[in-house]
Image: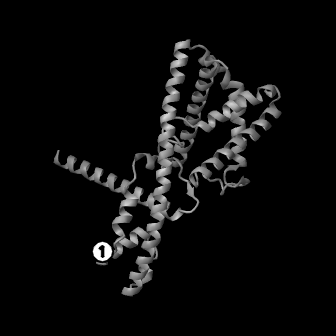
Amino acid sequence: MTAVELCGILLLFFIYAFLGWCFESTVCSVSQHKLVNRGFLSGPVVPVYACGALAVVYCLSPVQDNLPLLYLCSVVLMSAIEYFTGWLLETLFHTRWWDYSSHKFNLHGRICLANCLIFGLMAVLALKLLHPLVLHLVGSLSLVALVWWASSCTTLFAVDLFLSVRTAMQLSGKLDALQAALAEARERTEAVIAEKKLAAEQFGGMSLSERVDALLERGESLSLHDRLHELTHSHNMLHRRMLDAFPTMKPRHNKASLDELRAAIAKARREYRDAKAARKAKKAKNA
């Protein structure tokens, strides 16, 4: 393989990764009624779509004239890629990034029949209709432009991959620490409730962090409050984006800590919106 051929393949990869991101983000944004930057990476690329597209192009081109066989092979190939990707991410980060457990005919929650059939159809359309257009686009580039685009996209992709992996590892570590703090805080709050003979039903519908706040308002001293507050509020933009991108994310062992973290982020966003609305109302009143 020559350097020019490698640049061409890389550019095909990034084009399909971008188109996959457009599709995935559009579907998720519509279903969640808000803009969602979908995908493990922060940039506008979803590599699993690129891997699927290139696998179909290079593996299934010999059977592209036999539509039934092409579709069947596409379903199998795309399902295998999605399943392997889900397994790999779970193994590396101890977290299930998407979950189809509630869908009928799913396999370990990583793939489901409905999505497999849809992805198979998309693969056929990509090979028969989209790929000739993409090839024409890449072929129309000059050698300098081809090398520039391929090298630039590869550099940005590498940086994005590094930052995203680091973010996922930070998030995993944060959930581990938060889970330990929650376990200790749960013991403390239950001990305080029992010692002070407070009515347990008053706290039944509260999350653990809300229960801690309620006890503090009663004048109880809980040394873990500051630690819990720091763990649930020391999230950055990349953490929030990753949580938004995978609303069905499920850690293997830290589900309670993830729920607390999501609740803290949602609360912070509500407070920000309320403060912004208050400033806007005050400005309008003074105008």
- Residue 60 visible (yes or no): yes
Give left or right: position of 22 versus 186. right
Image coordinates of residue 70 in percent, x first then y, are 79, 32
**Label 1 environment density (alpha carbons within 10 Å; few <14, some 14–19, many ≥20):** few
As helix, strand or loop, the secondary structure at mark 1 comes to helix
In this rendering, is residue 89 above or below 61? below
- Residue 98 visible (yes or no): no
What's the image's color scheme? Answer: one colour
The image quadrant of residue 222 is bottom left
The amino acid beneath tag 1 is Glu
Residue at label 1? Answer: 217
Image coordinates of residue 61 in percent, x first then y, are 76, 26
In this rendering, is residue 145 above or below 199? above
Task: Identify the residue at image location x=65%, y=34%.
Answer: 51
Task: Identify the residue at image location x=58%, y=33%.
Answer: 17
Give left or right: position of 269 versus 1. left
The image quadrant of residue 210 is bottom left
Give left or right: position of 221 versus 54. left
Q: Quadrant of the N terminus?
A: top right
In this rendering, is residue 36 above or below 200? above
Task: Identify the residue at image location x=67%, y=24%.
Answer: 131
Q: Residue furthest left?
A: 286
Image coordinates of residue 170 in percent, x first then y, are 46, 51
Q: Nearer the viewer, residue 62 or 122?
A: 62
In this rendering, is residue 42 above or below 105? above
Image coordinates of residue 211 in percent, x first then y, are 40, 73
Q: Nearer the viewer, residue 179 or 73?
A: 179
Count of residue discs: 1
Q: Quadrant of the C terminus?
A: top left
Task: Identify the residue at image location x=76%, y=41%.
Answer: 76
